[in-house]
Image (cartoon, grey):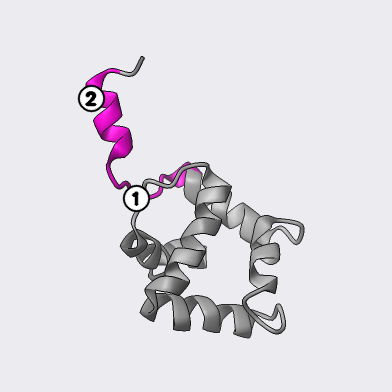
Amino acid sequence: MKDIKQFINESQDKYFSEQEKGKIMKDMWDKDGLFYKFMKDKVDHLTNNEIGDYLYGQCLDDDRCAAEFASYIAEVIGRNNFSIEQVQKFINTEDLKG
């Protein structure tokens, strides 16, 4: 049984740890990773331009797009207690650019 402090800390929205960002970036660069499977439904061609347009164009302005990307991230890092705003922050910062 978890103590109350641990439960509260785990249930709060948290930004991604360095380890989680590493998992996401590793998967995004892996041609057999979940990212490419996820993106096949989102863009016509898996080019850097189309992927960039999706992430930096659509997902920064559209909460539905960011929520879809959040579902991908949740699958990669194994948790989902983060907000859409945190996903958009991740996209918009140097974190995603590596």
Instruction: Give the extent of the magenta segment.
Output: 3-19
Provide the secondary structure element on which disc 2 rests. helix
Label disc, if present, on residue 78 of the rendered structure: none
| Disc nearest the viewer among 2 and 1 | 2
Ranked by sequence position, the earlier of labels 2 and 1 is 2
Q: Which residue is mark 2?
A: 5
User: Total number of numbered labels?
Assistant: 2
Provide the secondary structure element on which disc 1 rests. loop
Amino acid type of the residue tagged 1 in the rendering: Tyr
Amino acid type of the residue tagged 2 in the rendering: Lys
Identify whether 93 is placed above or below 13.
Answer: below
Residue 41: image quadrant is: bottom right
Q: Which residue is mark 1?
A: 15
Residue sitting at 52 percent across and 45 percent down? 77
| 38 magenta-colored | no
- How far, Cα to Cα, is label 2 from label 1? 18 Å
